[in-house]
Image: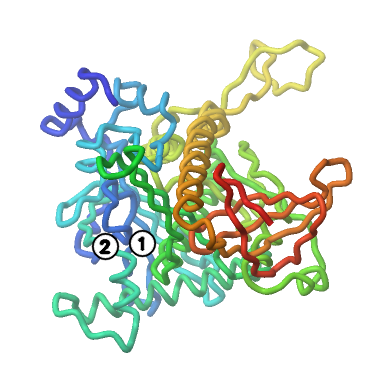
Amino acid sequence: TFSPALLAEADYLMENPIEDVDVENRRDLSHLNSYAIDDASTKEIDDALSVEGPLEDGNYRLWVHIADPSRHIALDSPLDVEARKRTSSLYLPTGVVPMFPLTIAAGPLSLQEGKIACALSIGVILHADGGLDDQSPPIITPSYVNTTRLTYEQVDELLDPNATPQEDITAQTISELRYLDYASNQRLQWRKDGGSLDGISDYNLPDMDINAQPSLEAPDGWDISITARTRHTASRIVTEHMLLANEALALFGQKHAIPMPYRSQSVRAVSQEDIDAVPVGPARSWFAIRTTFGTTISGNVLPHEGLGLDAYVQATSPVRRYGDLALHHQVKAFLRGEDLPFPKEEEEVDDDEPTVAVVGTVKKNKESEIIRMSQEGGKFVNRLGRNAEDYWLTEYLKRFHSQNAENPVKAIVLSADVRDRDEYQYQSKILLPDLGAIQMVKSKSRQLEIGAEIPLSVNSFGEFLL
């Protein structure tokens, strides 16, 4: 919840918006069809996609429009300070704890359908191989856009040549969605060629969708449902274009020496023989994930090998993640030619330490505050989210046992490790495909076969029994 003062501040800003400091630089892109593709239940609309073209040279420009909350929320204002404390919106099975009051987050901070909204837009022309066209640098600009909302299911249906045409959808919309689909396939193949995990396995492990709501009819007052979140063609379209926008912004920051929280990741080299030894499907995707080391956030531009990108930042969810919002402030200040709000800092050091010479003193470079915020931000929130999911999954499995004691749960073995010094020598990761959950199963005597589909019983504590 938010304090009455912050709620009042949000209401005031909705009626009395602050001055738009980027008004002179805003590019009017409201003539383009901009598609905000998301779940029907989503309230904070962060992004939309457009296709511009054909251009004079015959190419098409892809546009990724990102909501521009920095247009309405000034740095160090009361709402900004609160958002920085929260670090991100918190998504729990029982509901959402937003980073901003929902009235303004789902209002002017979002790309509202049918309204001219402020955005930060990234325009990109792709090379034939799916990479960024060296002859046509990305365009980074504040903008005006006018969005149309589509659900993942709607987009999948529109891309299906056998589906019945929808009366309110134009031929131009279908053509543009097909181009976005084509471009996302090009980008995915380009990332595979660059060594991404998708090159090891293109099977998408499902996500778990948990909903827990108070219910007078439930025995303990809570109604719990868990499903595996469906992966759509539209999901790939959105994912690939968000990665594209984040890559373009990272390369822009590298070119202009803008302090940014660059994200990098190393991947352990594996042979094709090792890959082929793992069954195709969920187990091979889990094998690919296990080749990765942790993500590093720093001021250095290093490859994100897991994604197959030479440079990468996160900037596409500024209504939900404060680090993304801070990066918007950073980029837009550079575009205006102003001092950066998060410059590379310096501090005085002893003469015998490695230094950077500065007239009149001896200093060394420190990481910009924007990098420290991204390094620290979200850790606590993510941990809360994981703990809540674990709790409600256990509660769900307890109920499953009481109602289906004789029926086993279907599971797929993702990995099978031997722990010689552990009481439970055999430890396996399993996927519950109907729930989208990945769990650990331990055994003192039985080693499971990777890739095998097995039945598991659940006891009254919500624990699995082999």
Helix, strand or loop at disc 2? strand
Residue 15: image location, x then y, percent: 11, 32
Q: Is residue 47 above or below residue 284?
A: above
Q: Would you say 231 lies left or right of 21 here?
A: right
Do callouts 1 and 2 mark residues in contact (Cβ within 8 Å)?
yes
- Is residue 49 in view from this perspective? yes
Q: Residue at x 72, y 59 (%)?
A: 415
- Dot 2 surroundings within 10 Å: few (below 14), some, or many (20 or more)? many
Closest to the camera, between mark 1 and mark 2, is: 2
- Closer to the camera, 115 or 5? 5
- Closer to the camera, 111 or 300? 111
Helix, strand or loop at disc 1? strand
- Dot 1 surroundings within 10 Å: few (below 14), some, or many (20 or more)? many
Residue under label 1, please give it: 63
Mark 1 and mark 2 lie on one chain; the one further toward the N terminus is 2
- Residue 68, image quadrant: top left
Please name the amino acid that badge 2 sits on.
Ser
Please name the amino acid that badge 1 sits on.
Trp
Q: Residue at x 54, y 61 (%)?
A: 406
Residue 166: image location, x then y, percent: 19, 79
Quarter placement of the N terminus:
top left
- Closer to the camera, 368 or 134? 368
Q: Would you say 153 lies left or right of 379 here?
A: left
Query: Label 1 vs label 2: CA separation?
Result: 9 Å
